[in-house]
Amino acid sequence: MPNSILVEGLHKRYKNHHAVRGVSFHVEQGEIFGIVGPNGAGKTTTIEIMEGLRKRDSGLVQVLGLDPDKEPLELRQRIGVQFQSTSIQERMKVKEAISLFSSFYRKRCNIDKIVKELGLNEVLNKQFKDLSGGWKQRLTLAMAVIHDPEVVFLDEPSTGLDPRARRELWDLILQLREDGKTIVLTTHYMEEAERLCDRVAMFNHGKVIALDSPKRLVTRFAAGHHLSFQSETADKALIQMLPGVERVERQDGTVHVRSRAVRCCLAAR
Ligand SMILES: Nc1ncnc2c1ncn2[C@@H]1O[C@H](COP(=O)(O)OP(=O)(O)OP(=O)(O)O)[C@@H](O)[C@H]1O
Ligand SMILES: [Mg+2]
């Protein structure tokens, strides 16, 4: 797959604070690429540099073959952005917000299609201030994809949502990938990254400390467990077959089990 995004040796300082310190990665066309990391790790800074909203100090950044610093207007026609926090005029109705955002783009927007796909019909006449958190996220996602962009950036799209709204949002994001879009999202939840992302970059203190598929990252970073118990009769081969179990040893009536993940479950009799 060709690359949609290329970032190489990216640096960004805010006065004395070196927020992004030599970050490199690429995002393939059609994948969901996750950025995870603690508060202040540099996720939003990096994503907003790719969107052309913040200027980098040094490094190479290309999105859809464009340099966000040099061609921000051209780029904005082809990317969709959902910010970490969006606030629009409190009294603006959902249908007014969608109509306003669709007017920003050269491309003719298919408003009916987006409204239907995101299930916004029932709230079209509601004002922004009267929407729940989940509906606000749906609306801002609609505003990000109204112009059928090739690349969509979602900065913590599910923060503040209850589990049901989060799962609904995941389905919408997966549908965007089905539609052929490339997606970059940030999240604090490894579970979300596991569910959605093809590859994940782990950020810490402005650096990429690991980059791999979520499954491989979890295997690499999840702390292993060591369980020991007394038994003369425990069946070593049977325990070995349990999911997550890596090694079983018996020493003088004590069985030692090493597991990869907490999901390993033992029922001893
Ligand atoms: N405009 C700014 N001026 C000064 N410092 C900033 C600015 N924006 C971000 N920073 C600092 O840069 C660092 C990285 O911030 P950034 O918002 O990129 O982190 P983040 O990983 O998105 O964090 P969070 O998970 O809290 O959203 C932080 O220490 C932050 O305080
Ligand atoms: Mg952030």
Image (cartoon, helix red, strand yellow):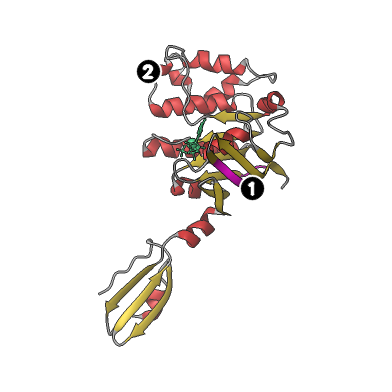
Q: Amino acid at mark 2?
A: Asp
- Residues 93 and 154: in front is 154
- Position above or below: 3 against 239: above
Identify the residue shown where x is 54% and y is 40%. 19
- Residues 129 and 19: in front is 19
Residue 30 lies in the magenta-colored region: yes
- Residues 242 and 103: in front is 103
Q: Amino acid at mark 1?
A: Ser
Mark 1 Cα shell of 10 Å, populated few (<14), some (14-19), many (≥20): some
The residue carrying mark 1 has its beta carbon less than 8 Å from ligand 1: no
Q: Name the residue tied to disc 1.
A: 24
Q: Quadrant of the C terminus?
A: bottom left
Which of the two discs, 1 and 2, labels the residue nearer the N terminus?
Answer: 1
**Splitting the image into 4 quarters, where does residue 243 fall?**
bottom left
- Residues 205 and 7: in front is 205
Mark 2 Cα shell of 10 Å, populated few (<14), some (14-19), many (≥20): few
Identify the residue shown where x is 39% and y is 28%. 133
State whether the magenta stretch is mostly helix, strand or loop: strand
Left-right relation of 32 to 194: right
Label placed on residue 129: none
Q: Is residue 236 visible?
A: yes
Identify the residue shown where x is 48% and y is 18%. 88
**Nearest to viewer (mark 1 / mark 2):** 1
Label placed on residue 130: 2
Q: Which residues are magenta?
A: 19-31
